[in-house]
Amino acid sequence: MTLPPCEECGFDYEALDPAEAPATVRSFAKRYRAPLTRFLKGEDGDALVRERPAPEVWSALEYAAHVRDVFDNYDRWIGQCLAEDMPVMEGPPPDELATERRYNEDDPEAVTDALAVNAERLATTLEAVPDDGWDRAGIRRGEERSVRLMARRAVHEGSHHLLDIGRGLRAVRDRHKADS
């Protein structure tokens, strides 16, 4: 399956060499920690990361918790594909998981710590994919997904949601300035 570039963030799936995926996935540990733990003087960082910029848009903390779980799921699914022939890869839809796990009630530091652990584990799994393993595949939501595609999707999720976090935090900060 070939995916077009993301219209919103510009991520080009085909431009990412799977060999680059481990380093990129590892980089997300630091890249997610900063916006969830560093704040301007006088800001209530805990409240800021939990505030949704709009009712239908996740908070910065919810996006980070989602990526934490995405990395865990992709690590598990890639492992399944390398060990089994065409496994069915289970897991609830993201919005359902966010509600079920109450992402916005998580501790931001714990989320960034777990995201770092999951990113490292996924990167290690990706480094171990043999040359002939990238085309192994499984079934997710009725469609075939190769290990190569899952590596690219994991990187896209990490990249895209950093953009979402940045936009969301800017919107929340702007709203706070307007209210002052």
Image (cartoon, helix red, strand yellow):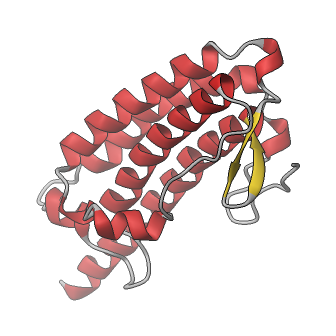
- Res 47 visible: yes
User: 104 above or below 117?
Assistant: below
User: 156 above or below 17?
Assistant: below
The residue under the point 45% across, 58% down is 166
Query: Is 79 positioned to the left or the right of 43 in the image?
Result: right
Indicate the position of residue 77 as horizontal and vertical percent values.
Answer: 58, 37
- Res 169 visible: no
Indicate the position of residue 14 as horizontal and vertical percent values.
Answer: 85, 41
Q: Quadrant of residue 31?
A: top left
Q: Quadrant of residue 20?
A: top right
Query: Is 46 positioned to the left or the right of 172 in the image?
Result: left
Q: Quadrant of the C terminus?
A: bottom left
The residue under the point 64% across, 47% down is 88
Comparing 93 with 106, the one in front is 93
Count of residue discs: 0
The residue under the point 38% across, 51% down is 64
Indicate the position of residue 75 as horizontal and vertical percent values.
Answer: 52, 32
Indicate the position of residue 128 as horizontal and vertical percent values.
Answer: 62, 12
User: 3 above or below 126?
Assistant: below
The residue under the point 39% across, 74% down is 171
Query: Is 15 positioned to the left or the right of 69 in the image?
Result: right
